[in-house]
Image: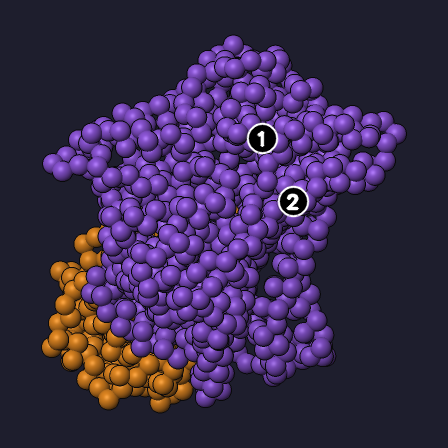
Amino acid sequence: MPDTVTQQEPDVRLAARAVDLVKVYGAGDTEVRALDGVTVDFPAGQFTAVMGPSGSGKSTLLHCMAGLDGVDSGTVMVGDTDITGLKDADLTRLRRDRVGFVFQAFNLLPMLTAAENIELPLRLAGRTPDRGWVDTVIDAVGLRSRLGHRPAELSGGQQQRVAGARALAGRPEVVFADEPTGNLDSHSSGELLGFLRRSVTEFGQTVVMVTHDPTAAAYADRVLFLADGRIVDEMAGPTSERVLDRLKELGG
Amino acid sequence: MWNVTLAGLRTHLLRLVMTGLAVVLGVAFVSGTLMLTDSMRLAFDDVVRSTAGGLDLQLRGTSEVSSATTAADERTPVTQDLLEEVAEVEGVRLAEGVVQGSAQLVGADGTPVGGGGPPAIGANAPSEPGLGGVDLQEGRFPEREGEVAIDLATAQSESFALGDTLTVVTPRGAEQVELTGLVRFGESDNLAGATVTLFEADAALERFSPDGSWSNAELYVEEGADRAEVAQAAAAVAGEGFEVITAEELVDETLASIGGFLDVFATALLVFAGVSLFVGAFIIFNTFSIIVAQRTREFALLRALGASRRQVLLAMLSEAAAIGAVASAVGVALGVGIATGMVALLEAVGFALPTAGLVLTPRTVVLGMVVGVVVTVVSALLPVVRSTRVPPVAALQAVAAPVTPRAGAARYVLGGLVTAAGVAGLLGGLFAGGGVTLVGVGAALVFLGIAVLSPLFTRPLVRALGVPVATLAGVQGDLARENAMRNPRRTASTAAALMIGLGLVGFVTIFAASLRATVAEAVEDLFAADLQIRSSTFTGLPDELPQQVEALPEVDLVGIQQVTDVRVGERTGFALAMDPATMDELFVLTMQEGSTAALADGGILMTPDLAEAGGWSVGDPVPTAFGLTGETELVLRGTFTGAGDVQYVLDSGTYRDNVRSTQVFSVLMRLAEGVSVEAGRTAVEAVVADLPSAVVTDEEGFREELEGTVNQLLALVFGLLGLSVVIALFGIVNTLALSVFERVRELGLVRAIGMTRRQVRAMVRWEAVLIAVLGAVLGLVVGVFFAWVLALALEEQLTAFVIPYGQLGLALVAAALAGVLAGVLPARRAAKVDILTAITVE
Ligand SMILES: Nc1ncnc2c1ncn2[C@@H]1O[C@H](COP(=O)(O)OP(=O)(O)O)[C@@H](O)[C@H]1O
Ligand SMILES: [Mg+2]
């Protein structure tokens, strides 16, 4: 499906955007510039993969974009909102209502069923779930028969798909996923990635996914390459071979 | 990672403090009680030694019945003639007559000095300073009618100064006297809290002994004379019906009677201290269970590195012992505060106690330490043994998830057996004469058994209780409910600690309500008079008061009640004497058998259980002993119920024949035709206007007064149970703090997906509320059961069984609010969880 790349047009709506983002950890000798002037647009309705060596700042970028972490300078926009100046309560509301997140592991509350986990952010917001939409998501993720199960009764792949469904249940402006397939076998990975792809293609969602896996990156519309806290390259319409080649060039 | 370590350390510290706190408070209660009673014992000891110890010998009439309920023993008085004869006995330097009675001082505010607490003693001043341990501190002893000396402590607390005119009420009525002297008793400023008013000898006799005889006589022997010989000679002169005892014997006898009271007092307090420790044991058990679960990896690692089970066991037991020791030491220190607090609490509910500073004996320290360490180690034993069962391979497992063992059949069986044993103990103690100890053990076992069983019904109960919470609090409430249900054992044992406190609160609440209803019923039947005069200070009313009110045109009929101690069969008890003629008009006993009619001619009435215990039927002779006159035979004329604590009823004539005291306990009045209660009351109150301790009540007032006594006791018990409830609340704080630590990742996750801090706090608080309410519900159910069983056992005395749903509901609401309070700290911690740290923890 890489041929469905949406060409970036000047008037395309942006789901999120970072401008000159700087994030520094520590000070003095131990100072680490996790993000060192990152400027990037995430157009709505696009699936972006973020790649780069370990420690290059991928997670940090996602955390900053999703309002999980503050930045030292620069601007983060989610939709039309500049979130860099927001207070904790506003950031929480932003994460709840306008952003979805899928972590590498431990995404679900163990005492809630799959269905309850999926609807948790909506319930936290006091929103009535849009039944039609939630059903669509659940069907897309192929979990209808597992809705009453608790995480302990689900496989790793199923758990990640529940997390994916939860991220989408509130129709967020953008979904961030940090190595969501990192702990999965290739079959389970395929199912999750297929779901993320469909959510973009069929439902017009926006997904930003960090991954190490070129095969996973090939599901995206474009790939950003990060190194030492900077975006060093960008590839539209990736295939796993091209991504692998590029990684070799960069890593070498 | 450093953040996590720090958080771990902080949690560790909190955990230690919280675990320790349960022990600290329990031990503080125990050592505080010991300190308090030791101090009281010492205070009494000082006073008794300096007064009774101040004389050489005492001459007194023998007494057949030693007083259990009324103020003083009934004895044959020592006449002036006898006193003079004994004074002539070889070796007697001085024979000093002593007369005592009640003399109530009136404070500047018009209320009786000392309230209804310690006795107000009136006596004759010694003929020389120092006799009987009475020393002159300031001024002089009274030399004539109208002068008094009082104890220094009372003068100080009431700001009386020499030369002041005081009001004092004696059996002769109220009068104005001049304060001429202040006295001390050996080292003490007062006589164990009592107020003492000393009169000139003739003035004292006139007030306290109208026939001019002395209560007893102090004998002082000449230098070099042999006390025993003098005692023998004096006894020979006095003859039959008198005895001469040494100062040492008098000291021992007095201390023994005070000691008996102090023992009862100490035991009662220690029972409550024991309840606190019992609750504390649950907290310790619970905390150690959680700690062991959270440290599974650590134990596995130790085992993998070659530590034996024994070593792990010893290491954990030492940890428990160390916590116990430190906490006990703090507890003993805190006991000083508790003792001070208890004095204040007792004072607040009207029991002022004499103390000469707090005494910390080595026994208190040792006992406090031993109790604290033993309770800690024993409570920790089960979880510690569990820690040794961790297999070494557990170290290799990626996540040491706290295991939640399924409740098995073993738990049903064990819990069922313990509960059954507890119920058996209760029933055996209450119905088969097994006694209070068996009842206590049974109650403790019931609590323990229910605690063992409670994980089995925690889920359904919390699910049900959570319905309103989820409706009220939305998703936070829902999550709180899920969290409370996820580890039923932990939730249950945390709640069990509160169950004990609330079980007892529920029990005494129901018992008190039933008692109040019983009193109300009894008063309605019993109190046929329009008005009653009683003394608020238990010191009796002036002798001529009945005649004074009888003379009022508003009053139609007057009956007096007098009280004395009697020994009936083997049992010493409290007898009320009345004139049968007025009894049926003013004070109507509910007769079960027989009637009051035949009482006059040497009859006695008693409660049915006493008659049954003695094996007497109506018409049988009943051996009855009076202090003064010794054994005689009365005839059982009937049995009655519903007269409160009255055990025996006598005819006034029998009373006069056998009792020397003329003190009136209460005066009952029927008003003349057409006189309203208000008009009657106004007239009667005018008569007693100068008697501050005389209280005029009608039926309603009488009932309210009795109910007030029940409420006072209830307040005292609530105060004493308060500590165990507080300990249980610390248990909730502790469990939740540990759970929050355990759930850091989850908390990070929910924050990441949009839970606000406020919602996180609410979630934890609601969990605390659910645990508290669970404990309260379990406790109240047990409390209702206890009260019901006791009501069955006391069917005769407790004629009403009332479950005060409103008050129990209030207790439930209070428990829920306390849960909110207990949740505050853990909730704050949970809300502070750093999202990134939490979700990036590997
Ligand atoms: N909380 C932190 N404290 C200090 N340094 C951090 C922290 N989080 C990330 N870093 C550092 O910032 C850099 C980028 O980290 P990260 O965004 O996690 O990289 P990636 O996800 O690409 O592997 C790394 O050098 C990492 O060590
Ligand atoms: Mg990363």
Amino acid under disc 2: Gly
For label 2, the SS is: loop
Dot 1: element: loop
Task: Look at the picture and state if B311 lies above or below B366.
Answer: below
A74 to the left or right of B132:
left
Mark 2 — residue?
B241
Instruction: Using residue A232 as the reference point, say whether residue B202 is left or right of it.
Output: right
Image position, residue B153 (x, y; %) = 56, 25
Outermost residue on the top side: it is B163
Judge whether B406 appears above or below B526 on screen.
Answer: below
The tally of labels here is 2
Which of the two residues, B404 or B133, is positioned nearer the viewer here? Answer: B133
Which chain can be seen in purple? B
- Residue B213 disc label: 1
Mark 1 → mark 2, Cα distance in angstroms: 15 Å
Residue drawn where x is 21% and y is 37% of the image: B556
Q: Is residue A120 left or right of residue A134?
A: right
Badge 1 crowding class, 10 Å Cα cut-off, few under 14, some 14 to 19, many 20 or more, is many
The chain in orange: A
Q: How is the image coloured?
A: by chain
Indicate whether B392 appears above or below A177: below
- Amino acid type of the residue tagged 1 in the rendering: Ser
